[in-house]
Amino acid sequence: MDWNNFTFIDLFAGIGGIRLGFESVGGKCVFSSEFDEDACKTYEANFTEHPAGDITKIPAWSIPDFDILLGGFPCQAFSIIGKKEGFANETCGTLFFDIERILKTKRPKAFMLENVRNLVAHDGGKTFKVIKSHLEALGYHVYAQVLNALDYGVPQNRERIIIVGFINDVKFTFPKPVAVSERKSLSDILETNVDEKYYVRDKIRISRLERLKDKDYPKPYISHENMSGSVTPHPYSSALRAGASANYILVNDERRPTERELLRIQGFPESFKIVVPYGKIKKQTGNSVAVPMIKAVAEQMVKSLKAYYATGEIYNGHTTKITGFEAADNPDIISA
């Protein structure tokens, strides 16, 4: 198996942030699926393919064979999980079920799933335990950890749980944070000549500045307004949110980030095409992933797979270990 050239599928693809991360380490996408048509427009403009639609209506057998399944599955409520009788029915009615049925049918060598940090705590931890146990019941060795985009080079405080699995007993550790000197600052990503249309009305600007916790905070900063109305400045953006108000985050309490700045906050390349209006890019970046963080995970997965297959032999379609490959213990890995 040549892990310099592998195939993957991109489920719940959004605008392709996860795809970019895995393409950067040699992956080739052989199938994509996305429900939102506006996101599909952006995806098609950048990858020259229109994703298939609703994954719940796509038979698993019709998907091309692939090596790695990727999916930033939606943060839908999992209230149905654990309330149905019988282990086999626990995930019915959730979009995780579609990941499960595809894994069961296609048996890829690995997967990577992404979700909100709160998945770990949902329903007292029961939801995550059910998901992990279902993945393990399919025969996968599962690793999970909450990672922050800030640690991987983008100026955004965005915590997400990453769940990685391998059909063989591959030893895996999550990527270490990059050196502070290698991380982009707001000065690196903010534009200098910005159109007046991005600037907020004087009334909003004055109100924000009056409520700013540290009125002498050095520029540039991005502030966000929390539920209580407090305005807090930071040398980075808070997590981009798809459904937040237009003025949820402001640059120096003066203006909204531009479309390009929103993409930069998520680590998208400068070449990424913008083909939809501001409100839709705001939603799409809020629903997307921090590309450099995904790339770091992809690099670790490929490194681990290369090490495993370099010390194994194929027997009746399965890999049998000849010598062990031991990775350093990672105390932060979540266990059910």
Image (cartoon, rainbow, N blue to C red):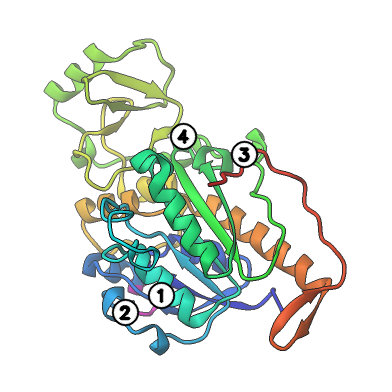
Instruction: Measure the C-alpha gap from mark 4 to mark 2.
Output: 36 Å
208 left or right, relative to 100: left
Q: Nearer the viewer, residue 129 or 96?
A: 129
Q: Amino acid at mark 3?
A: Asp
In the rendered structure, find residue 52 and report the number of the disc placed on it: 2
Residue 7, by quadrant, is: bottom right
Determine which residue is flagged by label 3. Answer: 332
From what the image shows, is residue 242 above or below residue 325?
above
Q: Pick the quarter of the image with the N terminus.
A: bottom right
Neighbourhood count class around disc 3 (C-alpha, 10 Å): few under 14, some 14–19, many 20 upward = few
Q: Nearer the viewer, residue 299 or 67?
A: 67
From what the image shows, is residue 208 above or below residue 285?
above
Instruction: Measure the C-alpha gap from mark 3 to mark 1.
Output: 29 Å
Residue 204, by quadrant, is: top left
Taking the image as drawn, is residue 249 in sight?
Answer: yes
> Can you give x and y, in whole percent of width and height, for residue 175 in the image?
65, 48
336 left or right, relative to 39: right
| Mark 4 secondary-structure assignment | helix
Q: Amino acid at mark 2?
A: Ala
Determine which residue is flagged by label 1. Answer: 101
The part of the chain drawn in magenta is: 44-49
> Can you give x and y, in whole percent of width and height, for residue 150 in the image?
52, 38
Which label sits in the foreground, 3 or 2? 3
Residue 326, by quadrant, is: bottom right
Instruction: Measure the C-alpha gap from mark 3 to mark 2.
Output: 36 Å
Q: Is residue 42 magenta?
A: no
> Can you give x and y, in whole percent of width and height, for residue 22 in the image?
55, 66
